[in-house]
Amino acid sequence: MRICLLTNQELDTVPFPADDWPCDPRPFLPDAEWVLATLTDKASAPIELEPLIQSGEFDLFFNLCDGAADQDDMPGIEVIEMLERYGVPFTGATSNYYEPTRMQMKEACARAGIASPAGIHARTIADVARAADELRFPLFVKHYSSYASVDLTPESKVETAAELMMQAGRIMQKHGGALIEEYIDGIECTVLVVENANDASAPLAYTPIQYRFPEGEAFKHEDLKWVDYDGLSSFPVIDENLAARLRDESARFFTALGGAGFGRCDIRVDKRGTPFMLEINPNCGVFYPPTDP
């Protein structure tokens, strides 16, 4: 099999940059014939990709491009749209599943009977004031289409209207909008879900993982995820009933969103044992170093 690997990383660079890690699937399929295609950014990626598709040389395109809509330097959905335009086989998310909005996720949860935190997509100060009036504190403020814990800090959890205004203003000024949700006090879990090639209505949900936070931390923020993560660890969910529920709800959520390829569901479980679906991450990060939590 001849596979074209689509990524924004120069995987064959020696030495590899010290501040990054190679997300490289090639060692897992050593018998395949791989061709590396490093796509530069959103604007140039379709131009770089189209000749590779037109060559007809590849049996499969292995797509690891995962740039969000506001990341101009990282190719994302435009890669998928080009692959779909030509109807060639590729791995990962389809364009209609690639970056669902948080409101679309909440609607999918409602259709599937899955709990999700009450929230408001704030674009104006009036929206923030409405969140303070209608939602229950503590609240959590994040990017309206959050990814990679971008711009989350320990102060993203707010207890008062004044703190809410400060954090929402910070996120809105930088990103043009903020998602304000009721904070779920409890544990945090994650479930990897993959498409079932034999039955699209029954995706495969893997063993749920629970995070163990360092002392003084209760949720993943940007520094804890990417910088000071030595104290962060994870382990399989011990409670069998909870694990089964997390797998079931994650699989149903994936299906409700028209999931394709794979995705990671992030979930908070409150002190009564009720899971609240936070989000799904299509084309989530994979091939992390074994030393990472």
Image (tube, grey):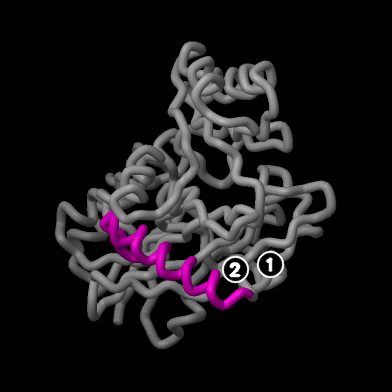
As drawn, 176 above or below 2: above
Name the side, left or right, on which 52 lies relative to 278.
left
User: Depth check: 287 or 242 in front?
Assistant: 242
- At x 37%, y 82%, the residue is 32
Q: Give the residue at the far front of this rendering.
A: 272
Cα–Cα gap, marks 1 and 2: 6 Å
Can residue 44 be seen here? The reply is no
255 within the magenta span: yes
Can residue 217 be seen here? The reply is yes
- At x 38%, y 43%, the residue is 106
Give x and y (percent) for residue 279.
46, 49
Name the side, left or right, on which 149 lies relative to 134.
right
* Residue range of the region highlighted in magenta in the rendering: 239-261
Q: Quadrant of the N terminus?
A: bottom left
Q: Which residue is mark 2?
A: 209
Give x and y (percent) for residue 87.
15, 61
- At x 65%, y 56%, the residue is 187
Q: Could you tell which of marks 1 and 2 lies nearer the N-terminus?
A: 2
Q: Quadrant of residue 154?
A: top right
Classify 10 Å Cα crowding around label 2: few (below 14), some (14-19), many (20 and above).
Answer: some
- At x 72%, y 44%, the residue is 223
